[in-house]
Image: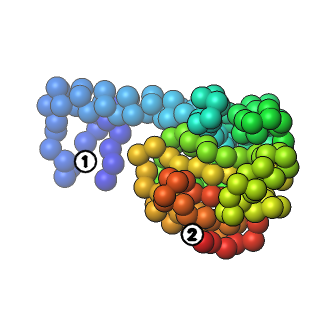
Amino acid sequence: MIRNPFDQAHSSEEQPESGRRRFLRAGLSACALLSLPMAASAAHAAAAKPYEKKLSFLNLHTGERAQAVYWANGHYISDGMRTINHVLRDHRTGERYAIDTDLFDILHLIQHKLGTQQEFHVISAYRSPATNTQLASQSGGVAKNSLHTHGKAIDIRIPGRKLTDIRTAAMSLQAGGVGYYPSSNFVHLDTGNFRYW
């Protein structure tokens, strides 16, 4: 039976409390009652806070960093995406391209699966067609019509994280291509059909 601490009446089955105990009990109950509106306000504030998706990058070629909210409350944020697109540009030519928002979402999901907010270290993101042609002529590992040239691919690593963990998290999404390059220390991600190599 819950008794109102402010009620001085006692049932016949209850032993009378000492004045000090009754005072402490009344004070604790009063504190609990007073904290209810604050708890409700905090819960309301938490519910009202916008749900945001944020990503951080370090371009290993330029040394530039970007941290931006790219999505909030069901909408992609132009300013945030512009900030990220700038850092993910073709570092050889300076050309920028609108990176596929699905790629941002894949990266965000990988962070969530790995339980980290660490920045992605970027080896390659957007590549201009000229850059891609040049790289393809030097290496058989570069596709002639690479998804990098369409803003749909990125090569990354996360400091302190095993490449195998990044690959496993990406493959569990089954949301695009996952390439594993341990000798070059990066994982390739793209928004094409699900496949891996």
Please, what is the three-letter code of the amino acid marked with disc 1? Answer: Ser
Drawn side of residue 1 relative to residue 154, left or right: left
Drawn side of residue 131 relative to residue 167, left or right: right
* Residue 172 disc label: 2
Find residue 163 and report its horizontal and vertical position in percent.
47, 57
Q: Is residue 139 above or below residue 128?
A: below
Q: Is residue 144 above or below residue 122?
A: below
Find residue 172 and report its horizontal and vertical position in percent.
57, 69
Quadrant assignment, res 138? bottom right
Closest to the observer, 146 or 79: 146
Residue extending furthest toward the front: 138
Classify the position of the C terminus by image quarter. Answer: bottom right
Find residue 123 and report its horizontal and vertical position in percent.
61, 45
At horizontal 54% and vertical 33% (from top left) the residue drawn is 42
CA separation, marks 1 and 2?
62 Å
User: In the rendered picture of this protein, how many numbered marks are placed on residues?
Assistant: 2
Dot 1 corresponds to which residue? Answer: 11
Drawn side of residue 42 relative to residue 176, left or right: left
Q: Secondary structure at mark 2?
A: helix
Quadrant assignment, res 5? top left
Please, what is the three-letter code of the amino acid marked with disc 2? Answer: Ser
| Label 1 packing within 10 angstroms: few (<14), some (14-19), many (20+) | few
Closest to the observer, 182 or 196: 182
Find residue 139 and report its horizontal and vertical position in percent.
68, 58
At horizontal 57% and vertical 43% (from top left) the residue drawn is 120
In this view, the mark in front (1 or 2): 2
Residue 187, can we see it? yes
Closest to the observer, 41 or 30: 41
At horizontal 19% and vertical 47% (from top left) the residue drawn is 14
